[in-house]
Image (cartoon, rainbow, N blue to C red):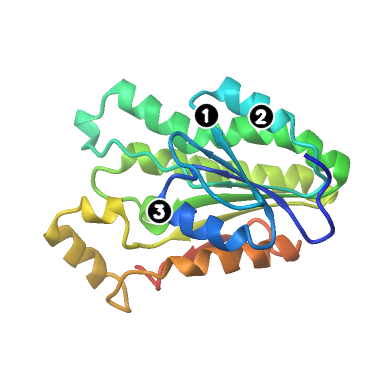
């Protein structure tokens, strides 16, 4: 993969099989090169390279081979074994933490040397307002997502001087498979906590990413895209 032209990023989209990731990829691929990492999704387009990965070692091998001076990491992976604290197993806690935090941590260790060398880089972590607020049964999910905020802060403190930024998008509720898995009563309550009383528009994600790509002053922020969810 050759160096990206000015203003054009090589965007690594992990968790590319999610509905929100697909909508975002459709928009971003019009301008940027996309490396889509997922287990079973494929994408069409001149700017999209598909990689089917299921292990850290495979992810490492692919990412290490990227040759670009303009790299962006976007991770849509979100895994939750919802359970009350007393019922949460060690296995489920570890699984959620590995997918929600450690994947970002391992990727940062691979990508930071490349970004330092080119004096440019972007980390965009995807979280949710519910995870940051915490809720009944979401401890293991929230733990990993909140730990990623700490990772973001550390990246900025140590590497902002090399032109590297790290930000988090805290999403609200969208018309996705995960939303439809919720009970009708929970859906009603969640929408009651949203001032607009409606689901968020997933088309807001790609333009927000574009702004982050263009402006290094946007750094170490949690940007809420949740229609004011309380």
Mark number, residue 198: none
Q: Is residue 217 left or right of residue 175?
A: right
The circle on residue 62 is 2
Q: Residue at x 32, y 21 (%)?
A: 91
167 relative to 115 in the view: left or right: left
**Which residue is at 49% across, 45% downward?**
16
**Tag 3's secondary structure?**
helix
Residue located beneath label 1 in the image: 53
The C terminus sits in image quarter: bottom left
Tell me the distance, in whole angstroms, between the alpha carbons under discs 3 and 2. 23 Å
**Residue 63: x percent and y percent?**
68, 32
Is residue 162 or residue 10 the one in the foreground? 10
189 up-or-down from 78: above or below: below
Residue 10, position as x, y percentages in the image: 71, 48
Left or right? Give the position of 215 relative to 95. Answer: right
Q: Secondary structure at mark 1?
A: loop
User: Which circle marks residue 19 in the picture?
Assistant: 3
């Amino acid at each position: 993969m050759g160096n990206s032209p000015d203003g054009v990023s090589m965007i690594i989209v992990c968790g590319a099989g999610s509905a929100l990731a697909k909508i975002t990829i459709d928009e971003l691929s019009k301008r940027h090169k996309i490396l889509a990492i997922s287990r079973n999704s494929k994408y069409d387009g001149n700017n999209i390279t598909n990689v089917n990965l299921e292990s850290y070692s495979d992810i490492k091998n692919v990412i290490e081979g990227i040759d670009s001076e303009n790299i962006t990491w976007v991770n849509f992976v979100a895994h939750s074994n919802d359970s009350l604290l007393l019922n949460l197993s060690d296995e489920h806690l570890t699984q959620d933490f590995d997918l929600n935090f450690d994947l970002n941590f391992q990727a940062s260790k691979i990508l930071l040397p490349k970004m330092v060398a080119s004096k440019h880089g972007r980390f965009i972590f995807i979280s949710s307002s519910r995870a940051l607020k915490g809720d009944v049964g979401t401890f293991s999910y929230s733990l990993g997502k909140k730990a990623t905020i700490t990772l973001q802060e550390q990246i900025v403190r140590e590497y902002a001087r090399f032109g590297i930024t790290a930000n988090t998008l805290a999403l609200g509720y969208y018309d996705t498979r995960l939303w439809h898995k919720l009970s009708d009563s929970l859906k009603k309550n969640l929408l009651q906590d949203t001032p607009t009383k409606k689901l968020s528009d997933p088309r807001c994600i790609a333009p927000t990413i574009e702004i982050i790509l263009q402006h290094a002053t946007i750094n170490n922020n949690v940007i809420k895209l949740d229609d004011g969810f309380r």
